Amino acid sequence: MAGEVPNLEASKLTALVVDDNFVNQSVHHKLLDRLGIKNDVVSNGQEAVDVHCSGRNYDLILMDMDMPIMNGIQATRRLREMGIESKIAGVTTRAEEEEVKEFMEAGLNDFQEKPLTISKLVSILHNLELYVQT
Amino acid sequence: MHISLFTLYHSSVFQKNLFPTYNFILYSMDLKALHLKLQEMRQSFFNEGYLNCQYTQIEALEKDSSPYFIVEIITLYFRDSPNVIAALEHELAREPIELPKITKCINRLKSSSASIGAIKINNELEKANILLQAGNVEGMKEAVRRIKKEHSELRAKFETYFQFLAYSFLCQLMRRAGPTEQAVNSS
């Protein structure tokens, strides 16, 4: 990782990792931990919707595209219909223009191609105005 | 209390996460030689094109240079990926093949392989995807054989590397624990 890793603990940001892949869940969770961002992990879009229905709210949602039960596009659409205004960043290995367009139109604020790294995550936070680089 | 290296090993995090226990004949290596060997082995993953810089990103996520996290991630990968490969083979054996199901398997494997930096496996998955989109089923089957080969080679390399890593880490723990005392028979 080039450069200093920012510590955003004082900002009290919270995030939700939505991914059905255990490796990605662990990596994304750890990436957010490393930045000092408290985060929860769920395994599919339906669980992401359920966790919001239970009253939880997050500053940032990292949303995978391909998931069982409810995929990222469906979950993003559903969350926006529910009035959830959290910043949602789509993260997926699938980066064909048509697929990205459909994902963005579902209600994403940003999109990053996997694999996620600290610098890509900082870029997401910067793009979504959750972190201002000094 | 006499501290047994193997007692430490069996109680360490590696035991519940790691691949089968190996015969440690490594104790004859001094620590400096062990560290050099470890560096060599780690570098060979990159020199031989198995891993890319994504792997170092994951290593660097552990603040105190503990190997626990990378071992955990790689173990998770090798727990899940054989099932995905098996599912892929199963789908390819169907007639007629169902393209969306095969695509799903490929994407799942691509996602986790990319996350750990397994570039050789990912390259084979890209080739497999191109063949799939062209409707070349026989080509796909050959591609899956290559994916399995790369997967098994990477796994074997990690098994050996983690064996050395576990031993090195245990030696460090023992050093920190200080000198051991021989148990004295009270009778």
Image: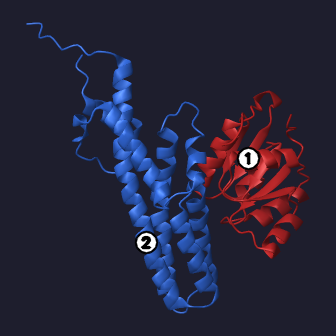
Q: Nearer the viewer, residue B56 or B131?
A: B56
Q: Nearer the viewer, residue A130 or B41?
A: B41
Q: Is residue B134 left or right of residue B185?
A: right
- Tag 1: Cα neighbours inside 10 Å, few (<14), some, or many (≥20)? some
Q: Could one spot residue A86 in this view of the protein?
A: no
Chain in red in the render: A
Q: Colour of chain B?
A: blue
Considering the image in quadrants, where does the C terminus of chain B appear? Answer: top left
- Tag 2: Cα neighbours inside 10 Å, few (<14), some, or many (≥20)? some
- Residue B148, disc: 2
Q: Could you tell me residue A46's position as x and y percent?
A: 72, 59
Q: Could one spot residue A73 in this view of the protein?
A: yes
Q: Could you tell me residue A120's position as x and y percent?
A: 74, 50
Residue under the image location 45 percent in, 58 percent down: B78
Badge 2 marks a residue whose secondary structure is helix
User: Residue flagged by tag 1: what amino acid is it?
Assistant: Ser
The residue pinned by badge 1 equals A119
Q: Where is B5 relative to A121, above or below?
A: above
Q: Could you tell me residue B180's position as x and y percent?
A: 26, 16
- Residue A14, disc: none
Q: CA distance from mark 1 to mark 2?
A: 32 Å
Q: Is residue A86 left or right of residue A116?
A: right
Badge 1 marks a residue whose secondary structure is helix
The lab-note entry on whether marks 1 and 2 share a chain reads: no
Residue under the image location 39 percent in, 43 percent down: B38
User: Residue flagged by tag 2: what amino acid is it?
Assistant: Lys
